């Protein structure tokens, strides 16, 4: 197993005790979260749902998971993929247009939020390298570009996590993006790194891009094609791709038919439950460590908050069970 350093920290005192006792036969799956994940003043799903999911774990724990507080990223760590001018804009709010380029209003606590939540993505990657799986209740990552935000994403925690894993000794990293929308920001940030591969199965063409030799982008238009597309891509990379040391999984729930942001009719709870079990089993069969983040998923007329939390718990459940 490749080495790892930093990122991971002791169980969060305020949360660790809320979880079920782990199975003594195997260590618990670390899931990173801290209250700063939801600190930004601008309130919507992406800036609030980590707390909804954490609260649900307090109310109804999933055995085999352990909530941990990640170390927030320092600005120097963000410079690996983001320009100093953009990082400074998010920290200070100046210029305001750049600080709000992800599409929502800036306030000073946005900085603490995104450093914590991107730190969680990095911590999950480093923890997964030491074991079998880890996750973070982070979202709002995959549209962020080198020099600006986009699509509610401020910093790109997937690219940051991939780079951190490579620094820690991983030879190749697979980014698996099953959010409803395309991960054009991630593509921009990793396209020139031959150690990072990218599978992207989307149901919306938002943030689409031209794939490189090491990436694929499927735009699925029918629910019947959704799971077959995921299966086909993973089987293809298993057959034709190199060995990987880590899978970074952007586990968006916004393909769900009830999701107001481009959900696809016919993609149900059962579809997404099957997807999660399939992804985690695929990684387990290959002995491939997996680090997941929550990604998209939005409350709407046909998807209330409890339902959205249940969908994200499918990922957590699969991580614990598989
Ligand atoms: Zn999305």
Image: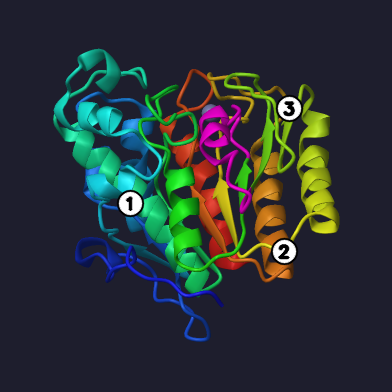
Mark positioned earlier in the residue sequence (2 or 3): 2
Question: Is residue 183 located in the magenta-colored stretch of the structure?
Answer: yes
- Left or right: 268 as drawn, with respect to 50: right
Residue carrying label 2: 243
Q: Residue furthest bottom?
A: 25
Please rate how many residues cluster around mark 1, counting C-alpha atoms within 10 Å: few if below 14, some from 14 to 19, many from 20: many
Q: Which one is earlier in the sequence, the residue at label 1 or at label 3?
A: 1
| Render colour scheme | rainbow
Q: Is any atom of residue 40 visible in this view?
A: no
Residue closest to the eye, 299 or 288: 288
Task: Left or right? Give the position of 100 relative to 299.
Answer: left
Q: Which residues are magenta?
A: 178-196
Q: CA distance from mark 2 to mark 3?
A: 34 Å
Place of residue 98 in the rendered image (x, y in percent of width and height, measured from the top left)? 28, 18
**Disc 3 element:** loop
Q: Mark 1 = which residue? A: 119
- Residue at screen point 36% across, 53% down: 120
Can you identify the residue that label 3 sits on? 266
Answer with left or right where residue 110 lies relative to residue 266: left
Q: Nearer the viewer, mark 2 or mark 3?
A: 2
In the image, farthest residue toward the top: 97
Q: Residues within 10 Å of mark 2 (few under 14, many from 20)?
A: some
| Mark 2 vs mark 1: in front | 2
Magenta stretch holds residue 316: no
Residue 259 versus residue 296: which sits nearer the camera? 296
């Amino acid at each position: 197993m490749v080495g790892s350093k930093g990122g991971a920290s002791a169980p969060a005192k305020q949360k660790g005790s809320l979880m079920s006792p782990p199975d003594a036969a195997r260590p618990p799956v670390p899931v990173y979260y801290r209250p700063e994940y939801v600190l930004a003043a601008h309130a919507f799903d992406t800036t609030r749902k980590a707390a909804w999911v954490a609260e649900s774990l307090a109310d109804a724990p999933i055995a085999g998971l352990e909530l941990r507080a990640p170390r927030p990223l320092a600005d120097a760590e963000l410079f690996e993929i983001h320009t100093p001018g953009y990082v400074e804009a998010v920290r200070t709010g100046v210029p305001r247009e750049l600080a709000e380029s992800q599409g929502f209003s800036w306030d000073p606590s946005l900085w603490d939020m995104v450093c914590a939540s991107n730190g969680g993505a990095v911590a999950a990657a480093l923890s997964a390298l030491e074991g079998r799986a880890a996750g973070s209740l982070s979202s709002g990552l995959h549209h962020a570009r080198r020099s600006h935000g986009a699509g509610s994403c401020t910093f790109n925690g997937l690219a940051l996590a991939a780079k951190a894993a490579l620094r820690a000794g991983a030879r190749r990293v697979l980014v698996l993006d099953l959010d409803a929308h395309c991960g054009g920001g991630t593509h921009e940030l990793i396209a020139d790194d031959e150690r990072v591969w990218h599978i992207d199965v989307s149901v919306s063409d938002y943030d689409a891009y031209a794939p490189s030799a090491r990436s694929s982008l499927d735009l699925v238009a029918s629910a019947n094609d959704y799971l077959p597309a995921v299966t086909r891509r993973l089987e293809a990379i298993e057959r034709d791709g190199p060995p990987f040391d880590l899978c970074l999984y952007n586990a968006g729930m916004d393909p769900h038919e009830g999701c107001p942001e481009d959900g696809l009719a016919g993609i149900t709870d059962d579809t997404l439950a099957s997807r999660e079990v399939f992804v985690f089993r695929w990684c387990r069969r290959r002995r491939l460590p997996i680090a997941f983040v929550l990604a998209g998923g939005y409350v709407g007329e046909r998807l209330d908050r409890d339902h959205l939390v249940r969908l994200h718990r499918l990922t957590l459940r699969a991580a614990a069970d598989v």
